[in-house]
Image (cartoon, helix red, strand yellow):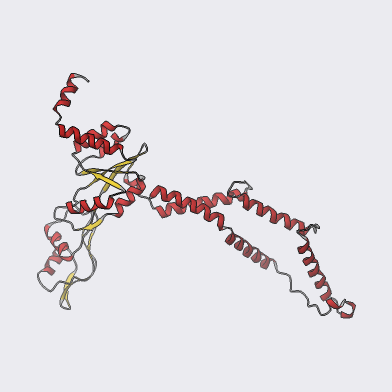
Amino acid sequence: MSSSEARRTETIPQWKREEVEELTEFLESYASVGVVGVTGIPSRQLQAMRRDLHGEAELRMSRNTLTNRALEEVDDGLEELVEYVGGEVGLIGTNDNPFGLFKQLEASKTPAPINAGEVAPNDVVIPEGDTGVDPGPFVGELQQVGADARIQEGSIQVLSDSTVLEAGEVVDDTLANVLSELGIEPKEVGLDLKAVYSEGVLFEPDELAIDVDEYRADVQSAAAAARNLSVNAAYPTARTAGTLLGKAAGEAKAVGLYAAIEDEELMPDLVARADAQLRALAATIDDEEALPEELQGVEAPSAPATEDEEQTDDEDTEAEADAEEPDDDDDDEGDAGEGLGAMFG
């Protein structure tokens, strides 16, 4: 260590060095570490969020300068989080994957009132309906902020949904009071994940905000398409070998029946077909006395199915086969679902 570095280290108060050491230990103890914004979260709600995260994630607050120093000392890629440390932020650590962490933090956000001077995160709308407020000067305040309000049936009512502030605009005192009186909470309060570093990869919120159900459905659809391709191409795999063998057995049996091959497994079907042909022939003979007793009075068989009917029968058979096959598909989908569950939490 150079003399200048030694002097700089000596000037750092002991409590700061201890804080950096604790932060470093915190960073090294979790598989995923992120930076979260805590701006505007009341102390009581912040403590409640800490309790909700217990056992799944840990929130650590410190001065930004000390947080940056700890991130740089740990290195190992975590220094990339330094650029996200600004304003009121904290560190969050978890052994869950980043997708699960993001999902958990988003689900924990709760509605909250908005104060004068704050920027509206989205359009502020006063909904149509009875405000429950008795006639008085409040109707003037509603009209002043842009609500379509009137006194009707003994109370102040809003006649239509009224957008009183657009996203990005600043809330003034009058609107803040009106919203408070109506109990409207137009913003969400919660830990706002800015970035998370996990297994050598830095993730930002837009990369983590995915529809898990839609993603799972896409994977299941891709697995089913791959299985169909394998079967149609006669490409054997552990998942399709059984289906391919069954299909081959069915085709071999059809060839055997068509060629009238005398095989032990085909004999019942061949005999049944010969019996049907014999009865059809007997039904065409008018002189019953010319027939053996067991063939007398045999009715003519039903008319053969038309091409359209045969096609319908084939489609029904295929539909039944498809209905019987999902066992393998269910296994595929189950495996895919479990994998995604582990990924997204």
- The image position of residue 332, as x and y in percent, is 52, 52
- Asked whether residue 207 is in view, the answer is no
Q: Is residue 99 left or right of residue 194?
A: right
Observer-nearest of 339 and 126: 339
157 to 184, vertically: above or below: below
Instruction: Looking at this view, name the residue that lies furthest to the top.
Output: 3
- Asked whether residue 326 is in view, the answer is yes
Q: Is residue 69 left or right of residue 334?
A: left
- The image position of residue 256, as x and y in percent, is 76, 56
Instruction: Looking at this view, name the residue that lies furthest to the right.
Output: 290
Q: Residue at x 12, y 74 (%)?
A: 135
Instruction: Looking at this view, name the residue that lies furthest to the left.
Output: 137
Observer-nearest of 8 and 36: 8
**Image quarter for residue 76?**
top left
Observer-nearest of 24 and 153: 24
82 to 297, vertically: above or below: above
130 to 183, vertically: above or below: below
Q: Is residue 263 left or right of residue 219?
A: right
- The image position of residue 72, as x and y in percent, is 26, 32
Q: Residue at x 64, y 48 (%)?
A: 234
Q: Is residue 263 left or right of residue 167?
A: right
Q: Residue at x 15, y 26 (%)?
A: 10
State the quadrant of the N terminus.
Answer: top left
Count of marks overlaid on the render:
0
- The image position of residue 139, as x and y in percent, is 13, 69
